[in-house]
Image (spheres, rainbow, N blue to C red):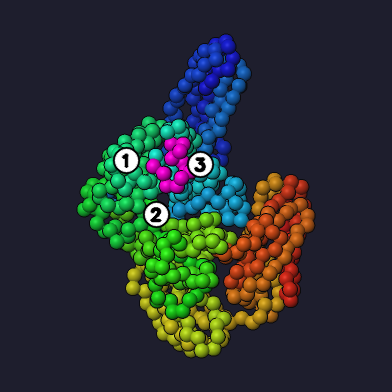
Amino acid sequence: MRNERQAAQPIALRTTVYDSAGKEVAALSADGRVGGDSVVEMTQAVTIRNPVLWSLERPYLYRVVSRLMCGATACDNYATPFGVRSFIFRADSGFYLNGKAVKIRGVCLHHDLGALGAAANTRAIERQLQIMRAMGANAIRTSHNPPAPELLDLTDRMGFIVMDEAFDMWKKEKTKYDYHLDWDAWHVRDLSDMVLRDRNHPSVFIWSIGNEVMEQWADSDKTAAPIARELAGIVHALDPTRPVTQAANNGSPANPVFHAGALDLLGHNYHHEVWKDFPTQYPGEKFIITEAMSALNSRGVYEQPSDSVASYETPYVKNHGPQPNTNYRLSSYDNRKAFWGSLHEESLSLFERYPFLSGMFIWQGIDYLGEPTPYEWPARSSYFGVVDLAGFPKDPFYLYQSVWTPGERPMLHLFPHWNWAQGDTVDVWVYTNAEQVELYLNGAFQGVRRKEGKVGHLMWRVAYQPGTLRAVARTAGLVTTSAVVRTTGKPTRIALAPDRVRIRADGEDLSFVTVTVRDRQGRAVPTAEPLIRFRVSGGARIVGVDNGDQISHTSFQAKQVRLFNGKALVIVRAGRTPGTATLTADGKGLAPATVRIAIK
């Protein structure tokens, strides 16, 4: 604490700990004296008897309130939420939280919020986390920079494991004008500030000191190990309770960063084919897959047949390997990937197989602006996400849901849509956590498929007929759930579905409204792409539109958007005046739709 006055004065630090209900559970006080225009550090130790532990299922938070007394006057106070938990990483069996073995099933997330851009918004971050939770993820990697504090507040409350990452490069450049120019002047301050800011968050379990740094590839200048030791030393001095890792895409045992003796966890990016060798290559070490997959998909695109796998180069490698489609679309079947990565099923099955792999982070949880591999402009956002830029799940989302959600919660995802042409042959896939699935087309039995293991899809090759495709899931002979897709008619009306119909009048809260079009029977038309226009009245405004199409150039701030494969999104932000906002959508030849959102 700093005394900005010229005269010395006595002080007292009163500390009170409260449980989640606001009940006092511990208190103590310490007296001291601070000189004029100087700083003094005071340390206190408090005991909470029989604490409720923070866990993924019950992220219980305490609150410590520190009150600084200057004589009889309270001159400052500060409240810090925190959680109580224990954890350990083991070389043979992975991660344990509060004594219980837990697989860290994570996603990498960039900082941008789709149509809202890079500025932090609490509700938008919360929505992203809710989508990831619905997929079954329990962890977030803040790739590749310190996160907004709002994200860590949310992960504390919602129960996520966080890998808090500091740098995307060290002293050697990746690009001409990147952080390497500021390394010497700023890396100590920036890393220290991150740890000091974030170390009280119970959701932070791992510190990452870098991502795919150039020093990992060769150590001719002998900088890799010294930098790794310096960074890990900074972190351990400020927080000795959490392990340090570094995300390396050079998985060779010759990687100089691995030999620095600085890492508590060896972090590996990709190279799933060598995961099985880790215990023999690095005996006694602890492992985490800091980045995996780099599979590529566009939502709602289904190229036939589905068993044709393509591995794409970056857009800067010409005339080598399969060439991407000229329409800038990539199939939503799990059969397209970047050459350095894998299909989703490949890496997921290996991760679930090996207990020594404590965790894995998918690249990427949600599409982000930039890096439109395997394309160049006019593509403008990534294809890596399991969820598109608008927040709509692509089909591999349900693969993870089938593996990462509790077995007592039956799930079955049937795709693709059933709007095809006579004479088409269509590959039908399902993801499920059941033992087997039966398929029927217009009541005619198409066969049964049984899962061979925990991870995978089931497939039928079906001659298209318009009508109803129905899948029935069974476990131990009993029906657990079913799913249906139907041929639809032409769109006749617009439908609006807000994620929340009541938002706060704080000028920041948001309602995310999904836009679809329906046929005369009320069925969503999955292939429709009409242009929809919006207007809003009342105490709100439209702050974003999107459709998840990686090649859409519609302004995110427009008041209109074209549906992409049957869906679009409009984002409504509350004003500061309570009332009711009315959002109206209309399109050529379609009955308009209206939805009301209460602003309280």
Dot 2 corresponds to which residue? 291
Q: Are marks 1 and 2 in contact (CB under 8 Å)?
A: no
Per the rendering, the mark at residue 61 is: 3
Instruction: Tell me where the magenta segment starts and ends, as one range.
Output: 172-183
Q: Position of residue 484 (x, y in %)?
A: 53, 78
**Identity of the residue drawn at 57% across and 64% down:** 551
- Kindly identify the amino acid type of the residue bearing the numbered disc 3: Leu
Q: Please tell me whether residue 213 belongs to the stretch shown in magenta.
A: no
Instruction: For marks 1 and 2, give the CA distance.
Output: 21 Å
Circle 1 SS class: helix
Residue drawn at x 74%, y 76% is 589
Nearest-to-viewer mark from 1 and 3: 1
- For the question of whether residue 472 can be seen, the reply is no
Identify the residue position indicated by label 1 in the image: 224
Which amino acid does the dot numbered 1 rest on?
Answer: Ala
Looking at the image, is mark 1 or mark 3 earlier in the sequence? 3
Q: Image point 49% across, 63% down: which residue?
A: 375
* Foreground residue among 326 and 132: 326
Which one is in front, 403 or 477?
403
